[in-house]
Amino acid sequence: MPPPNLRAMTMTQAYTYAAPSALVDGRLGLATSGGRALSGPAVAPRFFSGVVTQAAPAAAALLGVADVALTRYHQPRPGWTRDPVVTCGGDRLRFESFSACGGVYSRLDLLGDALDGEVFDRGTTNVDVNGPLREALARVGRRDPLHLGVGTDALTVTTLDGAVVEKKVPLPERWLRGFAEVQVIAARMDLRGELTGPAAVRFLRSLPKGATTDLWIVPSGRDLRVSDVHRPGAVHLAGAGRLATLHPLLRFAKALRVYGPAATGEPASCVWELELPGMRYSLALSPERWRGFSGEGAVLDELSTDEAEADADVVGMLLNFEPEVEIGLLADRAGLPVARVRAALTQLGTAGRVGYDLAEAAHFHRELPYDREHVRRLNPRLDDARALVEAGAVQLEGETALVRTDGGERRVGLADGSCTCPWWWDHRGSRGPCKHVLAARIAARATVLEVTR
Amino acid sequence: MSAWLKVRYLIKEKMTKALADRVLSFDPAERAEVAKQLPRYVKELQAAAIETVAARLTGTHTLADANDPWVRSNARREARGEALKYGPLLLIAGAGAIATPAAAAAWLTRREFHHRSAWHGDPMPRALPHLLRVVAARPAEWQAEVARRVAEKVRGANDTAFMPLAFGLLRATGAEPPAHEPLVLAWLDNGVSADDPLTASMLPRIFEVEGVGRLLRDEQVSPTPSPLFSVIGQLLADGKLTREGLLDGCVSRFLRGGDAPALRFFVRLHTMLDPSPEASSGRSRDYLRLLPAAPGPVADLALAQLRRTGPHDSADVAEGVEALAFRAEIKLARAGLSWLDQHVRRAPADAAELAPALATAFGHASYEIQERAAKLAVKHQAALGPVADVLADAVPLLPADLGPQVSAIFGGETAADVPEFAVATLPAVAAPGPFPAPEPRAEFWSLFADFWYLDDPVRIEQWLAAFVEDVTEDRPALRAALRPYIESGNASHWTTLRCWDHNAHWVAALVRETVDPGSVAAAANVAQAVPAAASENLMQLIAPAVKRVTAYVLSATKEEAEEAEEAEEAEETVAEEDSPSPLTAVMSLAVKNFFIPRVQSAEHDRPDEQSAPTDPRLPARRSVSAPQMLRLRRLHEVYTALREERLPPVLLATPTLVTGHLDPTVLVERLERCAAEGVEPLPADLQQALLRLPRGARPDLAERAAKVDLIAAAAVADWLAEGGMADPETGLEWHVEDGRYGPIVRIAPVLVARPTGHRYIDELLRHPSEQSTHDGQSWSLTLPSHREVVAVNLLRYVVNGHSWELRAEYIVGMADAEGPVGEATALVLADVLCGKGSGALTALLRMAAKGELPAEAIGRQLALVLRHTDRKVRPALAVLAEAAEQGAHEQVWTIMRALLPGFLPGEGERPNVNHSAVVALAADVAVRTGASGEIPEVSAHASRGRDSRFGRECVRLRDQLNPVG
C-alpha cells in the first residue's frame, strides 16, 4: 500500500449529456447525466416536466446555485466547474452545488407551490449548466412563462442539433467528502435568527463587503446585529463575501433565516436560508474561509461503529428518494431503535446518500451521482484509525487506552474522547475525534463483542 | 550514412536548418526509423547527463552510488536541461518523422523540450520557421490534428512554454483553434494584432471564456486606446468585425454575470462601440434584465441605453423602475425615481403599476431616496389614489419625519418618532479566572512533544512551574516522564547552538540535563569551547577589528549609536576611520549576526555588573524583546541552579490569575516554603514575581514576609510595604513630516522609569522595547499592574508599524491589566478600533465596565489617527456603535465628543460620507445619553444648511446638544 500522501486524491468525473441544457422560447430543458433513479441507475434520467410558476426567482436562484459551483471563494482563480446535482423527490426539486474551494454549499429547493407539472421518476443526477444557458436564465423576467424539463424532453432537444456534450472534471476527494459532510453538520444546527422582507434586505446589505471579513451575527430583539466578538446565541460568519450569491435574490426575498450550532465561541459553520416565493435558497458556509467542509470530522463519531454501517445498509434501502425522511416511520420499517436510525442516517450522509433540510428539520434522500465506491472510502482519519487497530497499536487499560504511534505514545480517555496528541490539544474535539480516539473506540468495541460472544 | 545517424549528427551539432532540410527529404522507411530512434535517443541523452552530473557532484561514477536525494534531484534537473538544449532540434525531427498526429502532438508538447517561460536566449523562435516548414510538408489532416492537439495543451495566460509553437502551428496550418478556454487567455496575453489570422476566430471567444475580464481589466479606451482596443477599432473599420457582433457579445457577457472588475473591459468596449438607439432598442429587454442585479457600472450602462430607446410599455417601465428603486446605489435608485416621475407625468394611468416601486423606495437605506420617494407620492397623489393601500403598507419603512407626509394622504402607520433604544447595562466583568494549572501532570508532560509549543508565554510558565516542582519533589518520576523526548531525538542539536534565544532551546537543555545529568555540558562543549576557554584570548585578538566594524554597524541608526556608546568604552578608536564600502556592507551582515551578540554578551562581564550571571548562550539584551529577555534569564537561572543543585522547591513568579497577577499571600507562602527548605529563590524569578503583584501596599503581608529568613523575603517585604515601584513616566509623541509620498508618521514612545535597584526590572523598563515579541501577550503577563507601560511597548505595532501583529489577546490583556491609563493606552485602542476583527470591542467594554476607559483620550487619538494615517473610520464606527448598544453609550459619547473637533472637515475640506456617518453615530449616541453642551465645530457645519446628509446630521446633533439654538 502506498503511503497515505501518495494515495490517489483525485478522481475524474465524466459527465455525458445527450444535448446541452438550453432555454428556448420559455422552455428550460436541463440535460441530465448518469445518475440513480427510483427505477435504478439511469444514463439520462427524466424526472420532471412542467411549468415553474415563479419564473424570475427560480431562474435567479438557479443561477445562484450555478455561481457557487463556478466559484473558488478562498484564493480565487479560474478552474473546473462541477455541474450542479438535482434531486427529484416527488413533490419538489432540489438543486445542489458545492464551491470549488469546498467551503460553500448551496441548495435551491423548488417546492410544490412553484411547480406545476408531471413527475416521471424520482432520483438524483447532474444537470448541465453552460454559458448560453446562464445567459438565457438571466433574461428571464417576472412576466415570462417558464417551462422546466429535467431530463430529456423531446421538444427541447429537437430544437437543437442534438450534439452530445461531454465534460471531464476532476473531483478531488476533499471536495467530495465536504459535499457529503455538510449534511451531517447542518443536522446539528438550530434556527438562530429570522428577518422578514425589508429587514432581511437591509441586514444583508449592511454586512461588510470584504470577502475576508469574519464576524458574529447576534440576534437582538427582532433584529440581527453584527458583532466582532462572540455573544451567547451568536452565529459565526466567516468570510462575509461568501454570501455574495444571496444578493441578486434579495429582491424576491420574503424572509431570511440564519442557522447555527450551539455556539461555543469557536468558529463554526452556519447556514443562511432565503425564503423566496415557492422556493428556498440556502447557503452553508464552513467555519473559516480556508477550511473546506471535508476536514470537519463531524461524521466520525457515528462512523466508527460497524453497527452503523450495517444499519445504514438497511435504512438506505428504505429511503425511496423521500423528500422528507420521517425517522419514526423509518425506525418502524427498519425495525431499529430511533437512535440507531439517526446514526445510520449520519452514516448515509457521509456517503452522500442523504441531505439535510433545515427548514423542514428533516433528512431527504439523494444519492450523489459520483462513483459510490469512492464516496464510501472518504475518511482517511478512519482509515488511519483502522490501520492502527490492525497493527495492534491499541492497548486497552480500563477507562483509558494506550495508542502507540510513530510520534510516541498517546493516552486516550474512552469516556470523554480525549487524547494526549497535539492535534487534540489544538482542536479539543472541535473537528471530531482524532485517529487515536477512533482507534481506541474501535478496539474497545471489538473487545465488547469478544466478551459477549 | 543512414538517415538516423545523419539526423543524430545534425541534432548533436545543433544544425537546425540542415536538419530541417534532411527531415524534409525523408522517405517513409527513413521516417519510420527516425521515429523509432528518437525517444531512445532522448533517454540516452538524459542518462548520460545524469551520470556526468552525479560524477561531478559526488566524485563517484554512477548515479546508483549517489544515494543522496539532493544529488539525485540535481542530476535530474540537469538531465532535463540536457533535453532542453536540443529541444528545438528534437521537435523538428519528431515533427517530420512521427506518423500519427496524436503521437506527434505528444512529442511536440513534451515539457522537457520547452523552457518554462520565454526568455531572450530561447532558441525556439529561431527554430520555429524550420519546424513549421517541416510540418507544412505533412498531410493536411495530420497538420490540422497536430495543431489542434498542441493548442489543447496550453494551460493558461501565463503558460508561455509552447505558446509560440501552438500559435505558430495554428497560424501556419490555418486549422480552426479548438474550443479550449485557456487558449483564449494565452492568445490575449500574447498580444493581439489586426493582421493575425487567428484574430477572426479568437476574438469572438473573449465573451465566453471565464477569466478574460480579469485579464483585460486594465485595458482602456481613453485617453489613448490600449493596443487591444486599437486592434478592435481597426478591425471594425476594415469590416472584419461587426459592431452588432461585438455588442451581442458584450450584452451576453453582462448577462452571464461576474463582478465589476471582471466586467470592466466589456463595459469599456460597450462604451467604445456606442450603439445607436436602433441597435439598443433591439436589446432593450436584455438591458432591462440587467438593471436589478448586475454590478453598478453595468447597470449604469444598461440604464443609459434604456433612456436612449423607448418609449417602453408600462410593464417594462414598472419592471425597470422597481429594479432601480431596489438598488443599493443611491445614483441608480434616484434615476429610477426620476424615470417614475417622468412616466407618471406622461401617463398618469400607469401610476398604479408603478406604486410597488415607490413602496420599495420607501424602504431604501438612504434618507435622500426615501425623501424623494415620499415627495413623489405626495406629488402624484391623485394618480396613486387607487393603489393607496400599497403605499400605506410601506409607510412604516419611512423615517419618522417623512412618514406623516405620506400617511396623511394614503394612510398607514408611521414609525416611532425616536428610534427606541433598548438601554443596556454594561456586562459585568467576571473576576479573572485562575492561571491554568499544569494538571493532570502525567498528561501535561506528554503534551509538549514539540518544544516549540513552549514559546507561548502561558505554556512556558506552566511548564517551568511544573518542572521545578517535580524536579525537586520526585526526580525519578519526572525523569521517566521526560525520557521519551530524549529517546525520540527531539531537538537533540539545540544544545549545541551558540545562542539559545527561544524558550524551547532552554527547555531542551533542562530536559536533557534532568534525564541525563551532564549531557548538555558535553554537547555544548563544542560551541562553548571558543567563548568559555579561549574566548578571552580570541576576543582580545580580534577586538580592534570587531569594535571598528561593530561600531560602524551600531552607529547605523541614532538609537543604536547610543547603544554603542553605552556598550563600548573604546569608542574613540572608531569614528574617523573607514568610510562605508561594499565590503563593509557584507561585513556588517556578518557582524550583526555573529559579532554583536558576542560583544554584547561580553558586555555582561563589565565590572559594574559582575553580580549578574552571564552565559554566552544568552542572546544580546536588545536582540530579543524585553519580556523575552527576562524570560530567558529566568530559564537560564533555573538551568544553572539545576546543574548546581540549588533549585528552590517552588518558583515565586508563577501567576495565580490568568491576567498574570500573583496573589501576594501566595507569594509569601512560596517564600516560606523556600525558607523551610533553606534555599534562596532565584533573582530573576523574584523580580518577575514582584512585577506581578497587584497594585497597592499590603503592610500585613509585608510584616509576615519580613519574618522569613531569606534575602529575597526582604525585597518582597519592602515592595509590599511600599506598594510596589513608582509608576514610570509614560507617554508618546506624534511626529508628522511631509514625505515624498505623503506624510510620514512616527510615534515616539516615552518611558522613563526610576531605578528600583532590581537589575532585571530596571533592564525591562530601560527603553520602550524595539524588538517584536511575536507574542504581545507577554507584556501584560510580565507587567499586569502597569497597563500604560504595556501600552507604551505596544506602540511599536500601531499606526504604520506592524499592526497586523497586534492581536486581540494582546489588547484584551492590556485591558485586563491594572494601573493608570494614559495616551499610550488610548492610542493603542484608537488604532485597533480602526482595525479588523481585533479585540477592540471586548477591551472597550471591559475597561468601560471597570470605569477605566480613557474615553476622551481615545477620541483625541482617534482623530489624529484618522487625520494622519490611512486608517479607515468605518470599522471604528461599527465597534463604537456596538459598544454603545451594549451599554457603553456614555463612554462612546465621550469618545465621539472628543473625536469630532479634530475629525470634522476644516477650512477648504469637503465633507464626505465618512463625516456623515461619524456625525450620525454621534447624534444617535447623544440622543441616547441625553447629552448636552455645544460643540462649536458641529454648530458651524449645522449652520450651513441641511441640503446634504452631512448637514442634516449636524443639525440633528446640534439640536440635541443645544435645544434652544
Image (tube, coloured by chain):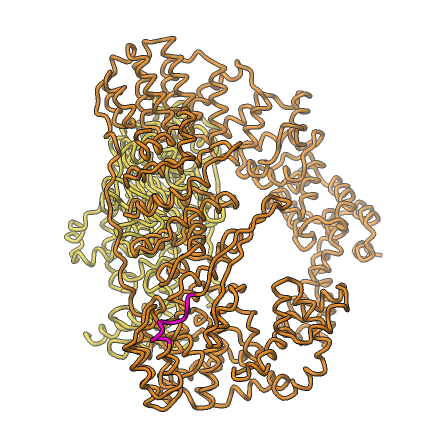
Chain colours: A yellow, B orange
The percent coordinates of residue B447 (x first, y second) are 38, 74
Q: Looking at the picture, tell me which residue is in the foreground, B17 or B399.
A: B399
Please state if B951 lies on the left or on the right of B558 as rendered. Answer: left
Q: Is residue B400 above or below residue A46?
A: above
Q: Is residue A391 visible?
A: no
On-image quarter of the C terminus of chain B: top left
| Residue found 24% across the figure and 70% down from its top | A415
Q: Looking at the picture, tell me which residue is in the foreground, B331 or B696.
A: B696
Check residue B724 for magenta coloring: yes
Q: Is residue B871 above or below residue A248?
A: below
Q: Is residue B963 visible?
A: yes
On-image quarter of the N terminus of chain B: bottom right
The percent coordinates of residue A27 (x first, y second) are 38, 26
The percent coordinates of residue A146 (x first, y second) are 35, 26
Q: Quadrant of residue A438?
A: bottom left
| Residue found 46% across the figure and 68% down from its top | A1
| Residue found 28% across the figure and 47% down from its top | B886
Q: Which residues are magenta?
A: B719-727
The percent coordinates of residue B759 (x first, y second) are 49, 77
Q: Quadrant of residue B181?
A: top right
Please state if B317 lies on the left or on the right of B24 as rendered. Answer: left
Check residue A23 for magenta coloring: no
